[in-house]
Image (tube, rainbow, N blue to C red):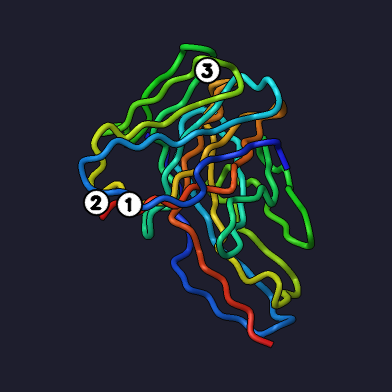
Amino acid sequence: DAGITQSPRHKVTETGTPVTLRCHQTENHRYMYWYRQDPGHGLRLIHYSYGVKDTDKGEVSDGYSVSRSKTEDFLLTLESATSSQTSVYFCAISVSGNTIYFGEGSWLTVV
Amino acid sequence: GDSVTQMEGPVTLSEEAFLTINCTYTATGYPSLFWYVQYPGEGLQLLLKATKADDKGSNKGFEATYRKETTSFHLEKGSVQVSDSAVYFCALSGSNFGNEKLTFGTGTRLTIIP
């Protein structure tokens, strides 16, 4: 357990509505990541953060934004959810020793 | 760019059988290599890792050796159990120290039957 909490764990939302997923860590790790998991694709990086207010895009960033106003929290926002964003979202942190640990996931369904 | 190719699934084995899940990679520099396991309804758990050529990662009876000459990191276990049923992901992280963005394979679903 790397002290990562994701919320909400499950959400159903309507197309066009905004959605925010939260990732909270209990330790002061610098690097945090958001991935999405889809069948046939494995996990793909959406955005990552290397410090407060420091973020960058990953492989599949279109339609997503992120914010990190505190070291412990990394927020992922879907400004206007689409059905293609139905997925499982995983937050992760990088811990010393070149190892990444994952949260338990947030299941998002866009109807 | 970096990429990981792993064995297509699903894989079904009998209990106590020998397991191999193949993984090959393409990367610049000297990546670190990982195997993650995902049990139904759960997040990914780090199973093992290797950070340089010829390193062997091991955990819970699973092993994988970092082979730079064949760009491979195959996962093996000598005798599988029903509890090993899960999805296994091979992954690599680039050589940018401190920012270990992972590139994943597509995953291999393993089912062990009693």
Residue at 73% x, 43% y is A1
Q: Reading the chain from its start, which is encountered first: label 3 or label 2?
A: 3
Q: Which residue is mark 2?
A: A83
Residue at 30% x, 46% y is A85
Q: Which residue is mark 1?
A: A86
Q: Amino acid at mark 1?
A: Thr
CA distance for labels 2 and 1: 5 Å
Q: Is residue A18 left or right of residue B34?
A: left
Above or below: residue A32 compared with residue A19: above
Q: Amino acid at mark 3?
A: Tyr
Q: Which residue is mark 3?
A: A50
CA distance for labels 3 and 1: 26 Å
Q: Position of residue B62 (x, y in %)?
A: 73, 60
Q: Are marks 3 and 1 on the same chain?
A: yes
Q: Position of residue A72 (x, y in %)?
A: 61, 22
Q: Secondary structure at mark 1?
A: loop
Q: Tell which subunit mark 2 falls on.
A: A
The mark lying in front, picked from 3 and 2, is 2
Q: Tell which subunit mark 3 falls on.
A: A
Q: Amino acid at mark 2?
A: Ser
Q: Tell which subunit mark 1 falls on.
A: A
Disc 2, disc 1: CB below 8 Å? yes
Above or below: residue B85 compared with residue B52: below
Q: Can you name the residue that lies furthest to the bottom here?
A: B114
